[in-house]
């Protein structure tokens, strides 16, 4: 198959799966037609879109592997004609002194032959703001936000210039809020000054979407942008694109509807309770019942329960439970084993529901989403309309007409999310 000659504008590399969707969602809302791929595709892009987000799982793997995967993604994006590259990481700058944000940034700069980029995780819509180089999560500094206790990437310093400098041999500087407020030309002047001082990575202050819109034009023609998902809102305008409903248009939805939930987050617990209270059919999966090779039998029971109900509207299959119940199961099975057992069962349920004719599927939980997407053999997702901040409907094409799927990470979404999601597609 030869590559279509498409006008791919932005090529994005995201260091995790739900982060990729978050970025894609911001781009769509700012007027770009976007496809998200699961890993680096092995064939050329087959859709006419403005941006592609390649979703990697490279946030906490060894830096050398993260670099190798990111360079693979870069090569593929360049082969599709991407005009600008965007390396997307978490809005809490999840990393360690070993990386992976610094080393991946450096490798991408080398590969692109560029000597300057920015680094800012600011995402004001989600309460992540950068002021004088310090990252705030909500009303507190990052290192007081709970992120200082993260099991894999504890963030104990909120000064992003220091954090980034610890991860890179290149010199790191700051474009502060006063410069940003003056707009693109002042930002460009500041970049020229920093360059003259030997700086090649600049942390940029941004405390509002206005700041991100002021920053956007200054990034036109910068070969590489590194950021959280926030900076994306200022980029589509550089390519002459404006927010439009067309960017989020997906093929018409049809088929049966279902929700699969493996998230045990506070918001998801409330969403499950709300769905049940609304009188819709819901079936719980008890992780203990999956032990001793019983998983497949449980999956078949669930599918037999769902089959006659689906014609009357959405059904919910969930393992979602309150923290005490989760802890009890984890004590019995081990944390990783319990997670894997439940993810595998829910992924089989998702596969079975699609075999029963479900074509509109909501999945709750980041890891659960990963497992379901894998079980459903989904390689590419076109990003559609937003249900709630950070959660868009997506469309996965297939020979059987395709599947509309929404992947909701734990604490996203309002209480009525599972009911209202389907309304967004109508
Ligand atoms: P979130 O986005 O809320 O973090 P995830 O799907 O990423 O949700 O993570 C939830 C994890 O908890 C998954 O590994 C899932 O399999 C596991 N899990 C789900 N339900 C239960 C349960 N009842 N007991 C123990 N573990 C569970």
Image (cartoon, grey):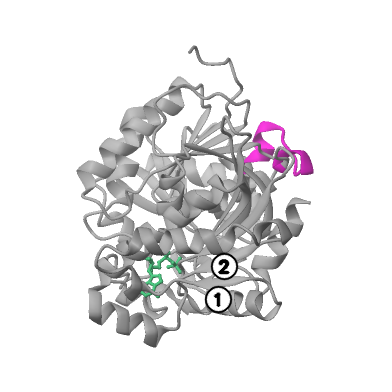
Numbered circle sitting on residue 285: none
| Distance from mark 2 CB to nearest ligand 1 atom below 8 Å | no
Image-quarter location of ligand 1: bottom left
Question: For residue 141, which quarter of the picture?
Answer: bottom left
Q: Residue 32 location in percent, x, y? A: 66, 38
Local secondary structure at mark 1? helix
Instruction: Sort mark 1 into few (<14), some (14-19) or many (20+) by Cα contacts within 10 Å.
Output: some
The first of marks 2 and 1 along the sequence is 1
Q: Is residue 154 visible?
A: yes
Q: Nearer the viewer, residue 89 or 336?
A: 336
| Residue stretch rendered in magenta on the structure | 235-248
> Can the viewer see residue 228?
no
In the image, 64 versus 136, the foreground residue is 64
Mark 2, Cα crowd under 10 Å, few <14 / some 14-19 / many 20+, is some
Q: Quadrant location of residue 159?
A: bottom left
The yes-or-no answer for disc 1 within 8 Å of ligand 1 is no
Q: Which residue is mark 2?
A: 412
The secondary element bearing badge 2 is classed as loop
């Amino acid at each position: 198959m030869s590559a279509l000659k498409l006008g791919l504008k932005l090529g994005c590399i995201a260091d995790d799966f739900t982060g990729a969707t978050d970025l894609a969602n911001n781009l769509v809302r700012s007027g770009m037609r976007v496809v998200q791929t699961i890993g680096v595709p092995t064939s050329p892009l087959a859709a006419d879109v403005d941006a592609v987000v390649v979703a990697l799982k490279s946030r906490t793997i060894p830096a050398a592997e993260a670099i190798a995967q990111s360079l693979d993604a870069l090569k593929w994006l360049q082969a599709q004609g991407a005009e600008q590259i965007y390396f997307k990481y978490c809005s809490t700058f999840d990393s360690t002194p070993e990386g992976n944000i610094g080393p991946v940034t450096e490798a991408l700069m080398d590969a692109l032959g560029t000597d300057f980029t920015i680094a800012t995780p600011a995402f004001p819509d989600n309460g992540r703001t950068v002021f004088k180089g310090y990252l705030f999560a909500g009303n507190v500094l990052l290192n007081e936000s709970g992120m200082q206790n993260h099991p894999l990437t504890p963030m104990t310093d909120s000064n992003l210039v220091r954090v980034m400098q610890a991860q890179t041999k290149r010199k790191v500087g700051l474009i502060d809020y006063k410069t940003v407020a003056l707009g693109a030309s002042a930002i460009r002047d500041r970049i020229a000054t920093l360059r003259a001082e030997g700086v090649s990575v600049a942390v940029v202050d941004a405390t509002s979407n206005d700041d991100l819109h002021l920053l956007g034009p200054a990034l036109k023609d910068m070969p590489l942008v590194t950021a959280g998902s926030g900076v994306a809102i200022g980029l589509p305008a550089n390519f002459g694109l404006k927010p439009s409903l067309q960017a989020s248009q997906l093929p018409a939805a049809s088929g049966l509807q279902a929700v699969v939930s493996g998230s045990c987050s506070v918001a998801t617990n409330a969403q499950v309770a709300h769905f049940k209270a609304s009188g819709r059919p819901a079936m719980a999966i008890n992780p203990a019942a999956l032990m001793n090779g019983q998983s497949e039998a449980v999956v078949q029971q669930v599918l037999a329960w769902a089959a006659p109900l689906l014609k009357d509207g959405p059904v919910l299959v969930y393992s979602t439970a309150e923290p005490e119940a989760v802890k009890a199961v984890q004590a019995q099975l081990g944390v990783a084993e319990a997670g894997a057992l439940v993810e595998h069962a829910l992924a089989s349920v998702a596969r079975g529901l699609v075999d029963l004719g479900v074509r509109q599927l909501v999945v709750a939980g980041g890891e659960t989403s990963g497992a379901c997407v894998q079980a459903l053999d989904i390689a590419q997702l076109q990003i559609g309309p937003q249900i709630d901040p950070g959660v868009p409907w997506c469309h996965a094409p297939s020979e059987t007409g395709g599947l509309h799927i929404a992947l909701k990470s734990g604490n996203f979404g309002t209480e009525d999310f599972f009911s209202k999601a389907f309304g967004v597609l109508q």
